[in-house]
Amino acid sequence: MITNGNKNYNKIAAEMENALERVIFESKPLEWNYRRLIGSVRNGLAPLSKLLKGSDLNFNPKYFKSVYGDFSKPYHMFNTAPIDWGVRFTEPQITNGLAHLLSQPERKVARLKAFMIAFGIEPPSDETILKNAQIKAESDSTERDRTGSTKRRGRIDLEILYDPLENNRGQKTHQKALIIEAKLGHKVSREQLQNYRVAASKRVVDPQYFILAQHDGDEERLHHKQRQNWSFVYWDDVLIAFEKELLKAGDTDESFRLFRRTLWERIDGSNRKRSGVN
């Protein structure tokens, strides 16, 4: 316990208070505290929300709440443990799972709104557009030459087509789309991106392209022209922004919460450092 009669303890307390006042602006203290608390949860001490309430440390949960969302709500992803099956989920498994969960009919509109906002896109005001959106994982992006022979073969990780065209301009079926190249550990390939843009441009009038990256520095592998076409976003930023919007929407689906929590573990949380050989 910190006592008023001990100057050293008072000094330490003051330093802690100053550090905690800065925690929202400094990622390292925030990440250290977050990982310490998650480590305690993994060891079975208590759910994260209860641990924060019962902790004798002098910190205010509002700093974590402002960054990671209101995890006092029981359906926040941090208030459940990730799937522990001894397997490492692959990119196709993750994107297929995400496409499936975004497509749930009774929750599709609210989830797509939250997802778009997490990518910095304003959702259409007409909810019918989102209700009828097409969500595909591993969408074919095979490119053929003039003779019909395969020139490049590939698959778009996640494709969300919305705002259908009434006149079906040529092969184009939708006005807008999110074209997402999701990277989990692997580095970005320049050839892939060109193929995806060619394929998407045949289906959509105004597609928006995103690379959903895990590690800092991945954007350096792109040509400057590709950086003009592709927006770089990071898994941790998107997942936290997505979580906050889902909390606002009141999404209490346990399967989806478990998926998000497992995905957060898969991307190694807010740690963007590259480790090992990819």
Image (cartoon, helix red, strand yellow):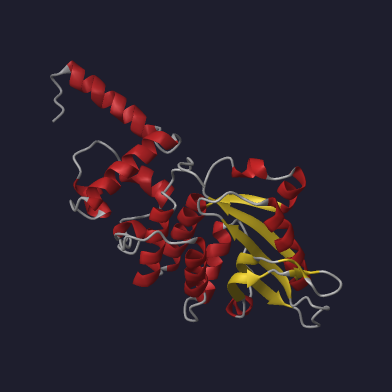
| In the image, farthest residue toward the top | 7
Where residue 25 appears, as percent x and y from the top left, is: 46, 36
Q: Give the vertical position of 26 relative to 278 (above or below).
A: above
Q: Is residue 18 left or right of residue 248?
A: left
Identify which residue, 249 or 193, lies in the foreground.
193
Where residue 276 appears, as percent x and y from the top left, is: 46, 42
Q: Is residue 162 left or right of residue 265?
A: right
Q: Give the vertical position of 268 relative to 27 (above or below).
A: below
Residue name at image x 36 percent, y 45 percent: 64
Q: Is residue 252 visible?
A: no
Residue name at image x 41 percent, y 62 percent: 260
Specify the quadrant that holds the N terminus: top left
Q: Is residue 171 left or right of residue 75?
A: right
Which quarter of the figure has residue 153? Answer: bottom right
Q: Give the vertical position of 231 relative to 216 (above or below).
A: below
Residue name at image x 74 percent, y 67 percent: 199
| In the image, farthest residue toward the right | 146
Identify which residue, 93 or 117, lies in the foreground.
93
Identify which residue, 88 or 135, lies in the foreground.
88
Where residue 60 appears, as percent x and y from the top left, is: 30, 41
Identify which residue, 177 or 95, lies in the foreground.
95
Which quarter of the figure has residue 219? Answer: top right
Where residue 139 appears, as percent x and y from the top left, is: 63, 71
How many tags in the picture?
A: 0
Q: Is residue 209 visible?
A: yes
